[in-house]
Image (cartoon, rainbow, N blue to C red):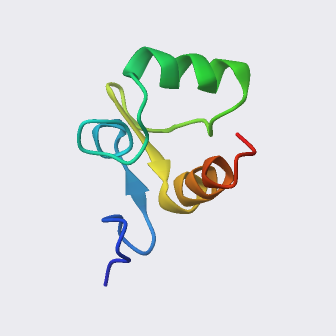
Amino acid sequence: MEKNDGFPNCGFVRLKDIILPKGPLPISRSAFWAGIKAGRYPKPIKLGPRMSAWRVEEIRALIATISRGEG
């Protein structure tokens, strides 16, 4: 069962589901990767040689932090 944010309860999500136009974060791919490099956003988990994903729990925490104005 999913929460109303469109993410599964647990597991992984891909970048296309995190950033706009489909995802909730209104930033570009390059800005998201720059945020990872700077330590503002969670690091991805490598699922394969050309596949990265993020833990749903970490993305929900990031969205909550941004919503509170802390990010």
Residue extending farthest bottom: 1
- Compared to 7, does 34 lie above or below? above
Give the camera-side residue of 36 and 12: 36
- Residue 16 coordinates in the image, percent (x, y): 28, 38
- Residue 70 coordinates in the image, percent (x, y): 75, 45
Residue extending farthest left: 22
- Compared to 17, does 30 lie above or below? above
The image shows a total of numbered marks equal to 0
27 displayed left or right of 71 = left
Quarter holding the C terminus is top right
- Compared to 54, does 20 lie above or below? above
Give the camera-side residue of 69 and 30: 69
37 displayed left or right of 57 = right
Quarter holding the N terminus is bottom left
Which image quarter: residue 14?
Answer: top left
Which image quarter: residue 52?
Answer: top left
Residue at x 61% of width, y 53% of height: 67
